Image (cartoon, rainbow, N blue to C red):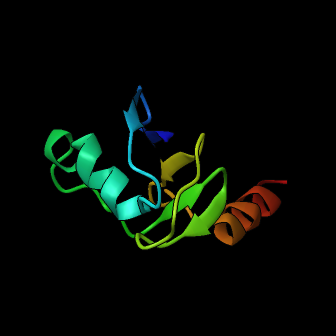
Amino acid sequence: MRVEVVYALPERHDSITLNLPEKATVGEALAASGIRERHPGIDLSRLGIFGRAVKEDAPLADGDRVEIYRPLAVDPKEARRRRARKR
C-alpha cells in the first residue's frame, strides 16, 4: 500500500511517499520514512491522518497521509485575548 508522511516546518516541508505492506501502522510508516534521522529532536506526540488525530499504533490504509503536527506557537485562546485587547 502507498502512504505519505508529511512534516511541515515554518519555512518548508518534508514529505516522503512510501510503499508499505498491508496492515502497516503509523509508527511503522514513521520508522520507514527516516523522519527521526532527518529531524533530530522531532516531537512525534501529535500525529494525524488527514487531520484526524491518531496514535502510532493506528492502522493505515492505502492512500493515507500521515501528518506530524508541531506544537502551537501561541494558545488560540490567548491569541484571541490579545487581539481583543488591541481593539
Q: Position of residue 30 (x, y in %)?
A: 32, 52
Residue sitting at 38 percent across and 44 percent down? 20
At horizontal 42% and vertical 63% (from top left) the residue drawn is 25
Residue 54 vs residue 82: left or right?
A: left
| Foreground residue among 59 and 74 | 59
Q: Position of residue 22 (x, y in %)?
A: 46, 53
> Which residue does the image show at 65% across and 69% down from the upper left?
78
Q: Note whether 12 is above or below 60 in the view shown.
A: above
Residue 28 visible at all:
yes
- Asked if residue 56 lies left or right of residue 61, the reply is left
Looking at the image, which residue sits at the far front? 22
Q: Residue at x 67, y 64 (%)?
A: 76
Q: Residue furthest top?
A: 12
Closest to the observer: 5 or 72? 5
Quadrant position of residue 19: top left
Q: Is residue 62 above or below residue 72?
A: above
Residue 36 in the image: state x and y as whole percent: 20, 50
User: On the picture, is 36 further left or further right than 1?
Assistant: left
The quadrant of the picture occupied by the C terminus is bottom right
User: For this view, does 14 lie left or right of residue 40?
Assistant: right
**Most extreme residue toward the right, as rendered?**
87
Q: Quadrant of residue 44?
A: bottom left
x, y (%) of residue 38?
Answer: 18, 38
Please tell me how many numbered marks the rendered image carries: 0
Can residue 35 be spotted in the picture? no
